[in-house]
Amino acid sequence: MKHSKQGELYGAVLIHEQELRNLVEFLEKHFNKISFNGKTKDGTNINFSDLEDFISYANYDTRKIIKLELSCTNEKQGIDIIFKNERLFVRPSTIEYYLKYDDQNWGFKFEDDIKNELKEFRPYYNYLTYFNLTYATMALLVIMVFLLISIDYYSKVLGFTGILKDGDYKSVNNYSGPAVGFTWAILIYILAYLLNKLRNYLFPVLFIATGKQVKEYQKRKNIARIVFGIIGVGIAINLITQLLINGL
């Protein structure tokens, strides 16, 4: 085959049976052979004979599918599509494809079409998976402290009052000290780590909701609703309280 193209798509992926069937139906219009290969949580590689064989896999937690590859070929073109869980700092890399073809016009159009098909696997919570919250929180904290000190310094250089008073610096040196600052940094890191773990559980980067994992996904979805419901009620109560206090 004369031409080839490697592409990558970013963002979370949620694979349900129906979306997978729709993808395979689209691929069958262009290829006469489609094979499935899955990698399980314990590192086992499983070759599935066809879509039905993959759908019928139990997919229970100890050996759930964590990586899926579709290989499609015919005499003139072929494509390998890989669904993977690779988290980058800002956004996850979850879909990779390798396209080979002879007809350039066909290749350009097919690539545009397959990208649109693959976008159907983006879940509603896609943007919630962006950033590693553990490191992002610490980086944000450092940036905020740096900006605060910088703004205070240049404000005083320009003759303004500044944000921090001299007494604040003395308070930091005499009371807080490096030990207290380090303790706060550790606490914030632990909280950010736990928040990141909870986020990854409720909103996974790659989730294959087939077999036993259908109920698991529904459970996580219900927990997410409860968590956001509690947060929403808390915010509403706080706003109502503030309105009542200000009204009085």
Image (cartoon, rainbow, N blue to C red):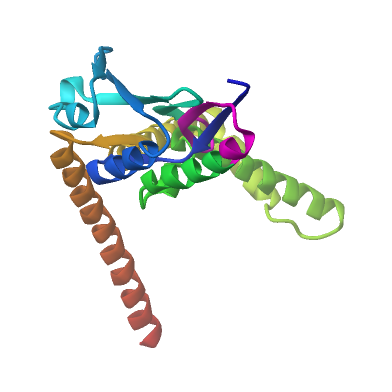
Is 210 displayed left or right of 112 in the figure?
left
Q: Which residues are magenta?
A: 88-108
| Residue 97 forms part of the magenta stretch | yes
Image quarter in which the C terminus is found: bottom left
One can see residue 66 in this view: yes
Whole-percent x and y of residue 165?
Answer: 69, 53
Q: Quadrant of residue 230?
A: bottom left
The quarter of the rendered structure image containing the N terminus is top right
44 on left or right of 206: left
14 and 136: which is toward the camera: 14
Q: Quadrant of residue 183?
A: top left
Instruction: Judge left or right: residue 66 versus residue 169.
Output: left
Return the residue nearer the eye: 203 or 146. 203
State whether residue 141 appears in this view.
no
Q: Which residue is at a point 39% across and 39% down the rendered structure image? A: 29
Residue 176 place in picture, x, y as percent:
53, 37
Q: Residue at x 38, y 87 (%)?
A: 247
Q: Vertical placement of 88 versus 124: above or below?
A: above
